[in-house]
Amino acid sequence: MKRMHVVVKRLMILATVVTLTACSSWIYRIDIPQGNYLEQRDIDKLRVQMSKEQVRFVLGNPVAQNTFDDNIWHYYYGIQYGNGNHLERSLVVHFDNGRLSKVEGDFELSDEFDTPLDN
């Protein structure tokens, strides 16, 4: 009788574990975004010789600025999707004498980037 009680107890524990692990795949997991969400249309608005204020208006505040050199701004966007996939994009903006000089990162620059807004 004692042996039967132990077997039933183990089967109940096993059934509980299997049930709980099966339900975990049905749990909704939220997407977790971090940083500046940038779209290609935002990058297309950038032009060489734009002021820092103009760049901030188009792209928003950078995620990171170099403490010792305010002429490099870093924009980063990452999202961890609930299904386990993730996406990362970065953009580095360089200024020379307070004017936009170079842009590097995961976006394509528009053909008009080298034409200042004044022209």
Image (cartoon, rainbow, N blue to C red):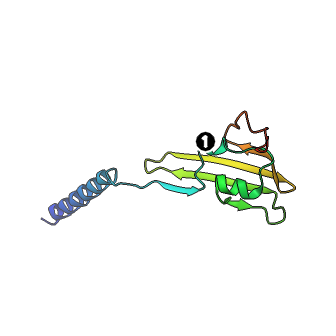
Using the rendered view, name the quadrant where residue 98 is placed. Answer: bottom right
The location of residue 61, given as percent across then percent down, is 66, 60
* Relative depth, front residue between 27 and 92: 92
Q: As drawn, is 55 to the left or to the right of 33? A: right
**Total numbered labels:** 1
The location of residue 111, given as percent across then percent down, is 72, 33
Above or below, comparing residue 3 to residue 86 in the picture = below
Q: In which quarter of the image is the C terminus?
A: top right
Using the rendered view, name the quadrant where residue 12 is placed. Answer: bottom left
Above or below, comparing residue 78 to residue 70 in the picture = above
Q: Looking at this rendering, what residue extends furthest in the right direction? A: 97
Instruction: Please name the residue shown 73% across and 59% down the image.
Output: 53
* Relative depth, front residue between 35 and 40: 40
Residue at numbered disc 1: 41
Q: As drawn, is 113 to the left or to the right of 32? A: right
Q: Looking at this rendering, what residue extends furthest in the top direction? A: 111
Q: What element carries label 1?
A: helix
Instruction: Please name the residue shown 73% across and 36% down the image.
Output: 112
* Relative depth, front residue between 24 and 100: 100
Q: As drawn, is 64 to the left or to the right of 33? A: right
Q: What residue type is labelled 1?
A: Arg
The location of residue 87, given as percent across then percent down, is 56, 46
Instruction: Please name the residue shown 17% across and 60% down the image.
Output: 8
